[in-house]
Image (spheres, grey):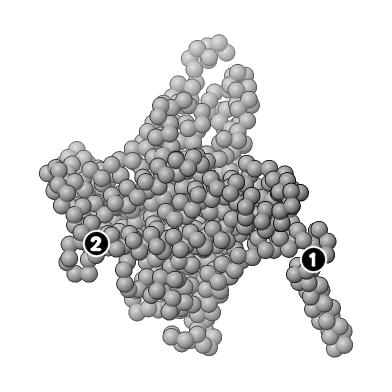
Amino acid sequence: MAADQVSMGTRATGAVRTAVGSVVSPTSERQREIRRIVALCLPFSVLLVFSGVFPLTEMFRISFSESRLVTEGFTLEYYRTMVNDPYYRNIAFNTLWFAAATTVASISIAVPVAHALEKYSLPAKSVILTILSFPNSLPGIVAAFMIIILFGNTGVFTNLLAFLSGQSRIDVAISTGVLGLFFAYLYSMIPRALLLLRGTYSEINTDAEEAARVLGATPLQTFRYVTLPQIKPGLIGAFILVFRTGLAIFGTVLILKGLLVWTLQIDRELAQGFNIAQASAMATIWFVFVFGFTVLALRYTSAEVSI
Amino acid sequence: MTERFQQGSLSARFGRPVVTLVLVLTLVFLAFPVVMTFVSSFASDWFGVFPSGFVTVQNWEDVIVGTGVGADVAVGSSLAYSTGLALGGVIINLIVGVPIAYAVARYDFWGRDWVNVFAILPLAPGIILGVAFLRTYPDLSTSGIALIIGYSLLKAPYMVMAVQSSFQSMDLQQIEESARSLGASWPRTFLTVIVPNARTGIIAGSIISWTLAAAEFNFSYIVYSRGTPPLAIFLFNNITNASFLNAAAAVSVFFLLIALVTISLQIVGNRGTIRRV
């Protein structure tokens, strides 16, 4: 038994040594190609390990730490808190429904917009495209400021509504409420959804749509039975990526504070007494959930993800 | 049947106007606040529906020169600091992004799809990575090195995608084999033939990942501790603490930066990538 293990161990090391040896000093053309692939992937792997895998592992370890300033001991206290405390359960619920609702809303808006961009002949199309993609490079805090401009206490729509309804401006301002935050999320998420859907839309077979129209289908029926099945994989892919985006939003909520979501609570754990262990536990849960969700969704749906 | 065609269905009659209306409303929703921000940054007050008291450069002066109140700093130092940090991130991105994009575009190997997914999907968003950095690299946080390596991981996907779109339009195998048969070694082929041919994608990718790194707020906010604030933190301080119109001017500075980037991307001519910004 022990001898078996030893021989298996030596065989494994032997195999590793042969593999490393063939990479370092290749003898065949195929081995040279493998060496090139390894060399090409190496810089990225180094970055991934140093700035991704290693810090995330540390974060994972800290979330079980008993001591606050050094990582030592093992406790499930922080995870237990998240499961038992209704405060955290409530935040998790808020985060999920809000991200889901904004994802559905932004995709429902992005589909007709992508449709119009692809099918209609529009004036000044390059200007339209620039406007639609511009918010993709804005950080969340600027999206929040845009909502303050529109719906804040002195916002343009607030003034308009106050004028029309005769109420005071403070009463009709929605920027710091849940609705204001909803619009702020949409400000970041619609351009993102559009980016993904435009790629899908450009690959549609238009012959089938024309055939359907000639055979007497209404535009809505054509969309429902011909276009929709074609864009379905892209649509599911967009749902997954936009939902991820929605869960990751932080700067916007930090300014508008309309709803206490998971990311905002992570910051509060740090800001109020630097509770790094609790923050790490929350970040770990976030990471595991999103990672697992993405892998499962890509594995078990027909989603196409191309960014 | 003919009757139905004459009457037309609801969607035939209203489908197009409704879709167009959604497009117009979306455009207004996205563009109107940007325009208002820029316009109001030249106003002296905003009490009614629209800002008034044009034209003043007081707000811009407060942002560009600094007000000198409290820990307030001028935009110049933040802009310069972020420019440097983002540039550091871009250099790392070039070193890691171009080779992996080439590996995925040129070679067929076991696990290629997964390598591609890892290169293209961000591993973790800014706030999660920020929390992870806090205790892992506590000494680096104050020097800005933590910001640089964080930015480079967060924005690497954009570099990889831009470079990949350039590689996909090239016949890589033929180019590589021509160069090799003329006697160039493989490293030389890669550095002096392949990379220069993909320069459009490389420049576009550099510009995009630079902009997004300079604009990154979530990661900077968690990791930044003291010293010159990065540009995104400067914007945040202005939005939360400064007067409304000063904030408008600060955000406008940022808009100008993005406009500049968009124009330079159009000059580079990589239209496919502009849409991805």
| Residue occupied by mark 2 | B74
- Does residue A119 appear left or right of residue B227 in this picture? right
Q: Quadrant of residue B120?
A: bottom right
Q: Amino acid at mark 1?
A: Pro
Residue B12, position in %: x, y? 49, 22
Name the mark on residue B242: none
Instruction: Report helix, strand or loop for mark 2.
Output: loop
Q: Is residue B230 shown above or below A8?
A: above
- Please count the marks in the image: 2
**How crowded is the residue under tag 2: few (<14 C-alpha within 10 Å), some, or many (20+)?**
some
What residue appears at the point 83 percent right and 65 percent down from the top-left corner? A27
Residue A68, position in %: x, y? 43, 85
For residue A240, say whether it is visible: no
Name the mark on residue A26: 1
- Does residue A289 appear left or right of residue B244 in this picture? right
Q: Quadrant of residue A261?
A: bottom left
